[in-house]
Amino acid sequence: MSRRTVELVVVGVMMAGTLVAESHKELRFNVGAKAGISVNNTYGSISVRPSTGNAVVINAILYSDKVEVDSSQTGNRVEIQSHLLPGATADSGRADYEILVPADASVVLHSSTGPLRAEKLHGDVTLEGAGASVDVRDISDAHVHVRTLNGPVTLTNVQDGHVEVDSLSGEVNLYQVTGPLVQVVSTSGKISYTGDFGRSGEYRLTSHSGDIDAIVPENTSADVSARSVKGEVHDDIPLQPKSHTSFLVQKGSAFVGTMGRAAVSSTVVLRSFSGKIHLRKRTAK
Amino acid sequence: MNCVELQQSLAEIEDGSSAAQRAHLKTCRACSALVADLNLIATSAIELREAEPSPRVWNSIEIALRQEGLIRPQRASHSLLPSFSSRWGWARWMVPAAAALLIAVGVYVRQHSQPESIATKIAQPINEAEVAGLNDSDLMQEIAEQSPAMQAQFAENLRRVNEYIVDAKGTVDENPNDEEARQSLMDAYQEKAMLFELAMDRSLQ
């Protein structure tokens, strides 16, 4: 037997083993308007997209027989739980979920490893996971709450949202995120906001040691207040100074002012203890 | 035995199994329903038992309350506290446990709403970073037991959030009237609270 044949046999055996261990499970639930969907997965990804009707469709890939899917429906609420059996590890206990839900459903996703992803929904979205990376996009008129330990968080095109992101050390990136309240709190992760701060919202980005970058287009209107206790602040955009501020504005460590038209401006508060804060103009590519 | 006597007697013989209780329950639909409800609560409470925080967490709360002088050590004999092992023990513990948690949170909020107490306690930054009796070693022990693979991540984030609290407290101490500094301190505590919550996350095993 040639060496190549041996290699092929070994690969074949390994693939066969994987295929035997892996299993698929599909579940369907009929729900009404504004249903609640909760998915709790210890190890593995959860991805949620809108369905066309009033059905919740769960497609799960289970990576071994050490993990099962427990499901229940109570009225308009569906709960899915990965159930780890004795001896399960991060690999053997892994399950990946692809879930379709009505677009107006409220979704709660938990996974300690992630990744977690939700898109094109307009119900409330809550995503939590210690090390999970979080990706939320194309959400409108909804509350978006994200909490991670060190998983990176990316929010893209969230309109009219009530957005709260807490991350201890994960990087937080917001692209075109607007709404009446956009709040990010991070201990050491970097926070980056790219967008125009909407028209009349409150935007509060706070970190302890992480840097904060806000990149805005030229026509942005906002009242901006930035302050870093021990770090630096940089402002590339000319601001109309304010006559009254709640704290002493020391050059290099704080700036306060209005850009654009004050009458339609949002309030932007950028705060860090030792991180660097940078407000910059978005350059046309 | 009338209804009042039966309800009083339930404190001693909890499941309505004495002869007098059984006799009354045969004739009284209301008391039968009450005993059925209590049995259901007891059964549900036993199921809740698995989701309870570890005894260390309760111990920590008890120690914190004792240090505040809000409770006294119990006598060894004739304990008035319900036993965990009795049938309805867990159900009975739920109300005092909830009250203890509220008191602990109240103590915590009170301590942090007074500038002078903040100033006096800044000398002990690490102790101050402990929230409502839940200390860092409790947290790390929980992680070691529940999710050892994430121990290093939690330890590093715990260190960072403690630094955040110490720095934020220092700023408040320097400028006690600075509302933003207070907000920053609140954010720091919120981050630490989140760390504890993630450590007890239901997705962790």
Image (cartoon, rainbow, N blue to C red):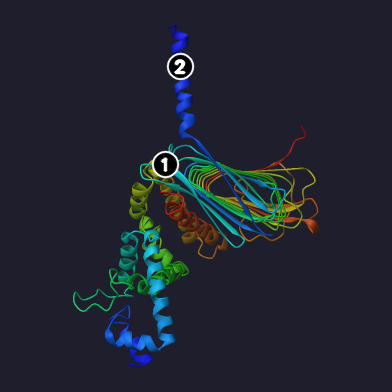
Taking the spot 37% from the left edge, 59% from the top edge, the residue there is B50
For label 2, the crowd category at 10 Å Cα-Cα, with few meaning under 14, some 14 to 19 and many 20 or more, is few
In this orientation, does residue A147 appear?
no
A193 vs B4, left or right, is: right
Q: Earlier in the sequence, mark 1 or mark 2?
A: 2
Where is residue B104 drawn, in percent x and y? 40, 69
User: Numbered disc 2: what chain?
Assistant: A
Residues under numbered marks 1 and 2 in contact, where contact means CB atoms less than 8 Å apart: no
Identify the residue position indicated by label 2 in the image. A9
Amino acid at the residue labelled 1: Lys
Which residue is more in the foreground, B147 or B113?
A: B147
| Up/down of A285 relative to A120, above or below | above
> Which of these two is toward me, A227 or B191?
B191
Same chain for the residues at labels 1 and 2, yes or no? Answer: yes
Q: Position of residue A9 (x, y in %)?
A: 45, 16
Residue found at x 30% / y 64%:
B59
The answer, for residue B200, to whether it is visible in the render is yes
Residue matched to label 1: A66
Q: Is A180 left or right of B5, judged from the image as shown?
A: right
Disc 2 element: helix
Q: Amino acid at mark 2?
A: Val
Instruction: Quadrant for the N terminus of chain B, please.
Output: bottom left
Tag 1 secondary structure? loop
Q: Residue at x 36, y 43 (%)?
A: B148
Which x, y percent locates residue A94? 47, 40
